[in-house]
Every structure is written in C-alpha cells, then in structure tokens.
Image: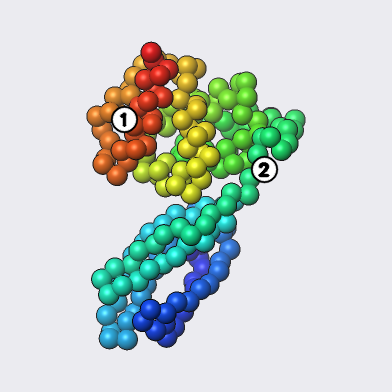
Amino acid sequence: MCRQTIEVTDVEPRGSASGSYRVNCEGDYRIEVNFASGRNLETQTGYITGGVDFQDEIIVTDAEITMKAVARGDFRISQDERECSADEERRAEELAAHAKTWNELHDTFRDYAVCDDGSIAEGFSESVTRLLADGWEALPVLQSVTTIDASFQTFVLRHIDETAPADRLERILGLATRQCAPALAELCDQIAGEARRVLS
C-alpha cells in the first residue's frame, strides 16, 4: 500500500503478526500469502486515504484472504472547533463546485468542511448532485470512501438539496431506485430518500 511493503515471515497456524505504514496516498491493499506447502494466495482489498488512522486485521485461511476494520479515526478538526479562515473561504469557493471524482470531493470536504455554508455549501451541493447524476457508475467509490469516513456520507446526503435542478434530482432518484447494485442497496436507499424528500 502507498508503495510500501510490510513483510512478515514464519507465521504459525493460528499465529499473528503486525506492522505499520504511513498513509500518504489513496488506494487499496495488495496482499500476497505464500504457504509452506508452496500454495499462494493474492488479493486486492480495502481502502485507505489520507487523514485517517487505520487499524485493519487481515485474516488468512487456506481458501481466502479477508479483511476487517478494527478501528479508524478521522483527525479532521470539526466545524464546531474552529471557524473558516478568509484564506480557506477563498480556496473552498474555488473548489467546492468543481469536484470531478468522489475522492477529489472527499479531499475538499476534509480540508474545508468548516466552510460549508452559504455559497460554498451551494457549490458542494453542485458537486454532489452532479457526481450522482452524471457519474452513477462511480457509486462504489463513494461507498468505499464513506465506509472509512462516515461523516462524508452525512455530508453527501445533506447536499442532496433544493439548490440542485429538479430534473437532476429526478435522475438521481431514478438511478437510485432502478439502477442499484445489491451491494450498494443501503446507500441507494438513503440517496433515494433524500432526493424524494427534496422533490416532494
């Protein structure tokens, strides 16, 4: 992960090992396991991003490699703890409405959530609803990001609001109710609920 390798050797059955790394990128884990028998397993899984402290457990059996989150903490300073500075306000104004991907929007959210008000909030709503309406195929990325940062999911749902054009909201509602993968059903239901609420 992040061009860093953690190598552990001679782990006994039912044994464990640990390691640490610096989060300086966004991406997933690439895991390779070599058994004493000569059998190999390999997978890519999980999601990491800057600004979050990760503690993940990798579980290896004879048949598969799985991962579960043990603990994750977001170090972002909340809006209740400080105010948006003039420089932050200017930068947020430039970025809020122009995110091209969920990862890009998450970066902007992480850096400028304290500025989420007025015209900047409208810009965030523009990005959220445009990404949903015009980039629905990237919904799995949104799911991945919100899995490790629940506050971003709250932010996304809050910005499905009345500042977006009605036809865009109707498109989002249609996509969420008719073009949703089963694995994303809970997120789709929440998106549909917000779009329906605003349209009603």
- Write the residue at 55% across / 69% down: 20
Q: Is residue 117 in view?
A: yes
Q: Residue at x 52, y 33 (%)?
A: 155
Q: Is mark 1 on a helix, strand or loop?
A: helix
Figure quadrant of residue 38: bottom left
CB within 8 Å, label 2 to label 1: no
The picture places residue 75, in percent across and down from the top left corner, at: 63, 49
- Left or right: 110 with respect to 12? right
Residue 161 spot, x, y in % from top left: 47, 21
x and y, in percent, of residue 169 in the image: 38, 20
Secondary structure of the residue carrying numbered label 2? loop
- Give the image's coloring scheme: rainbow
Taking the view exactly as shown, the residue that stands out farthest to the right is 86
Q: Earlier in the sequence, mark 2 or mark 1?
A: 2
Give the image location of residue 185, x and y in percent: 30, 38
Residue 130 against residue 22 in the figure, above or below: above
Q: Check disc 2 and give the amino acid type.
A: Ile
Give the residue number, with chain letter if any, for mark 1: 176
Residue 134 seen by the camera: no
* Gap in angstroms between the C-alphas marked 2 and 1: 32 Å
Furthest toward the front, the residue is 14
* Mark number displayed over residue 77: 2
Question: Front-most of 128 and 70?
Answer: 70
Q: Is residue 194 left or right of residue 19?
A: left
Q: Which residue is drawn at 43% across and 27% down?
A: 130
The label on residue 145 is: none
Badge 1: few (under 14), some or many (20 or more) residues near its Cα, within 10 Å? many
**Amino acid carrying mark 1 in the image:** Ala
Image quadrant in which the C terminus is located = top left
Q: In this view, does 84 lie above or below 69?
A: above
Residue at left offset 31%, top offset 30%: 176
Question: In front: 114, or 15?
Answer: 15
